[in-house]
Amino acid sequence: MADVYLSPTSVIRYETCPAQQQFYRQGWRVDYLSDTLHFGNSAHQALEAFHMADPYGRTVDLPQRFTDAFLEPTRTTTVRYGNGRDKESLLETGLVLMRLYPQVWQQTGFHALIDGAGPLVERKYRVRIAGAGVVLVAKIDVAVLDDSGRVILIDHKTPGQEHDPDFTARSDQILAYQAIFEAHADEHGVDRIDGVGIHPLVRRKVSTTGRGKGPTVNPPDIIERRSDTDVALYLEKVCDIASDIRAGRAHKRPLHEHNSPCSMCDYARACQYGDFTDLVNIKSPPDAKAEENQLAVA
């Protein structure tokens, strides 16, 4: 039985629409970058450099790091901008956020946890779910220690509007990070984590009138560690989804008109009309390259 490799994002993708996940696993990708994804990737690259340096007391020019990351891909990759957004305005927003971030972070008292390989920043993990033929893979933004020695996982987000704090406690993605990290916790000299959280950098457009709120970096929204029951139920769901994928179940899920995911799906035209314009096949689904990890999760 071949292993099924899943990430927290791919689990969400399958729950959104199994057909969408099937297109993705077959290697189909849009031949452009969305502006929001490009912005988020650029911010993550800059913040990775910041958190790799911060525990050692070194500083990083965050605005310059963001600028370099934001401008470089546009020379080789088409970035598609949404309504009312363009390269200049998004770059301006990013620069404001990068100038604000260090002060907000300093106020948390957090510093990246360090092991023999360095700070636990953008660290990749793979975990085998025992007896299920499923490997769960993830990259966690940063694991930190607070002033009292508590271990907390932080996930950076760059939403276009204010973060819903209730979502942190509901998020399967955050729960998955907890499960995956704790399977490796002993490698980092800890028993388990104490909390998880989302750190939102709100990419509102810079106001030209001075009246709007503009870009803001909010304090991290931290919750206590989710329960073992929550983790077990999530892993059960992951195994169920893997079984569906293995069986080739990829039903379309358009839902109701008022909340259909189809309008935001990269594969909508391919799915409905067989039109693969704007799609390319990379012929290497993510699970084909994933490395096995023999660690069992009960």
Image (cartoon, helix red, strand yellow):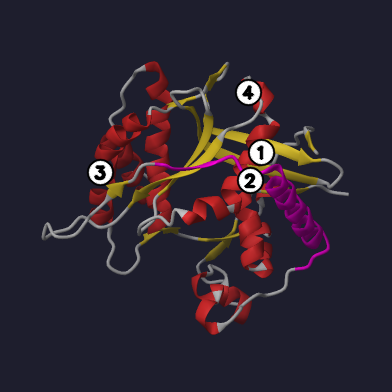
Q: Position of residue 250 (x, y in %)?
A: 73, 69
The residue mark sitting in front, 4 or 3, is: 4
Residue at label 1? 180
Question: What is the quadrant of the C terminus in the image?
Answer: top right
* Mark 1 to mark 2 CA distance (whole Å): 6 Å
Tag 4–tag 3 contact (CB < 8 Å): no
Question: Which mark identifies residue 95?
Answer: 3
Give the Cα distance between marks 1 and 4. 14 Å
Lower sequence index among marks 2 and 4:
2
* Residue visible at 25% across and 57% down in the picture: 205
Looking at the rendered structure, the secondary structure element under dot 2 is helix
User: Does 15 sit above or below residue 293?
Assistant: below
How many neighbours does mark 1 have within 10 angstroms: few (below 14), some (14-19), or many (20 or more)?
Answer: many
Mark whose residue sits in front, 1 or 4 = 4
- Three-letter residue code for mark 3: Leu
Q: Residues within 10 Å of mark 3 (few under 14, many from 20)?
A: some
The span shown in magenta is 220-249
* Tag in front: 3 or 1: 1
Secondary element under disc 1, as helix, strand or loop, is helix
Marks 1,2: beta carbons within 8 A: yes
Task: Pick whichever, 44 or 192, lies toward us.
Answer: 192
Identity of the residue drawn at 27% across and 60% down: 86
Mark 2 to mark 4 CA distance (whole Å): 18 Å
Q: Looking at numbered disc 4 in the image, what kind of residue is underneath it?
A: Val
Label 4 element class = loop
Q: Residue furthest bottom?
A: 257
Left-right relation of 253 to 278: right
Residue 245 located within the stretch drawn in magenta: yes
- Using the image, determine if residue 214 lies above or below residue 104: below
- Picture quadrant where residue 181 is located: top right
